[in-house]
Amino acid sequence: MKSEHWAITATILAGLSLAGFFAAPRLLGGPPRDAETLCRKSGPVGHTLILVDKTDPWSEVQAGRLKKLVKEVGEALPADRLMSIYVFKDVFEPNFPPLLALCNPGRTVSELIGNPRRDYVRWVEKFGRPLDEALTVLAQPAKGNQSPIVEAIGDVLARRENRVQSGDRALLLVSDMLQNSPQFTVFGNSPGARDPERLRRLVGKTWSDADGASWRLQVHQVQGVYDGARLEQASSLWQQALRALNIPFAWDRL
């Protein structure tokens, strides 16, 4: 009877070991991921969206600061979080494509207990290299006659693919904040130019329509080719509008 009991126990343990043997590659390799975005097929956990205004040229120093900012965000990105970079120019085109949209795949258990050098190379291939390629494009100069900042914000925030279901959402806006479009402009002397109430209404409608309340806003204002007084005027108009709308934000100069 005792020997029979041990035989049953041994059979169960052998079965568990065999199941573990076949399950180990799946467990150690991590959850299934989308081949294009590297995100879990169940969806990203949080989203950092970087929206870059390239309607005016930047100096080499400013381009370097932008690259540093984006690289720091990418390197600090938690595992399974989505990072996307959108660049808009003077001609606004709805649904303009992202320059980059990738999740940080993190490290699987097998990578952590494996060859560190080999696994670092693999991580660079999957995430680091595409990020570096995007940084090269971001640093290239551009110039335009208009600056549809509000329109670009509304477009990217309203997209279904950017509304992740799990985790928080953060919008990092890199721009001189000199809005110049038919809806509002900080230039010239036309009726409505630099009208705080007009900007407030425009931002309020855009933010509401795009479910902006679910996003955390951080503005990195770039000087570009304009003088400090012009930038300060734009900064004051925008911050006044955001406060009037009770939209939380952080603001700094890049």
Image (cartoon, grey):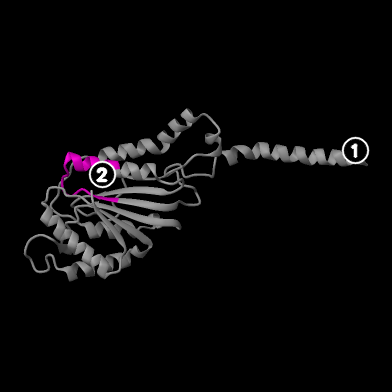
Which amino acid, mark 1? Ser
Percent across and percent down for residue 189 are: 6, 64
The N terminus: image quadrant: top right
Res. 164 visible in picture: no
Most foreground residue, 29 or 229: 229
Residue at screen point 26% across, 40% down: 137
Q: Is residue 35 toward the left or the right of residue 146 in the image? A: right
Q: Nearer the N terminus, badge 1 or badge 2?
A: 1
Q: In which quarter of the image is residue 63?
A: top left
Classed neighbour count for the residue bearing mark 2: other residues with Cα under 10 Å, few (<14), some (14–19), many (≥20): many
Part of the protein shown in magenta? 51-68
Q: Residues within 10 Å of mark 1 (few under 14, many from 20)?
A: few
Instruction: Give the SS element for disc 1.
Output: helix
The residue at 76%/39% (across/down) is: 13
Within the magenta stretch, is there residue 126? no
Query: Residue at the left extreme?
Result: 189
Total number of numbered discs in the rendering: 2
Image height check: is 164 above or below 196? above
Is residue 155 rendered to the left or right of residue 116? Answer: left
Q: Disc 1 marks which residue?
A: 3
Amino acid type, callout 2: Leu
**Residue 89 shows up from this direction:** yes
Where residue 76 appears, as percent x and y from the top left, is 39, 44
Horizontal and vertical percent position of residue 8: 84, 41
Q: In this view, does 184 lie to the left or right of 107?
A: left
Question: Disc 1 to disc 2, how far (Cα)?
Answer: 72 Å
The residue at which mark 2 appears reads as: 66
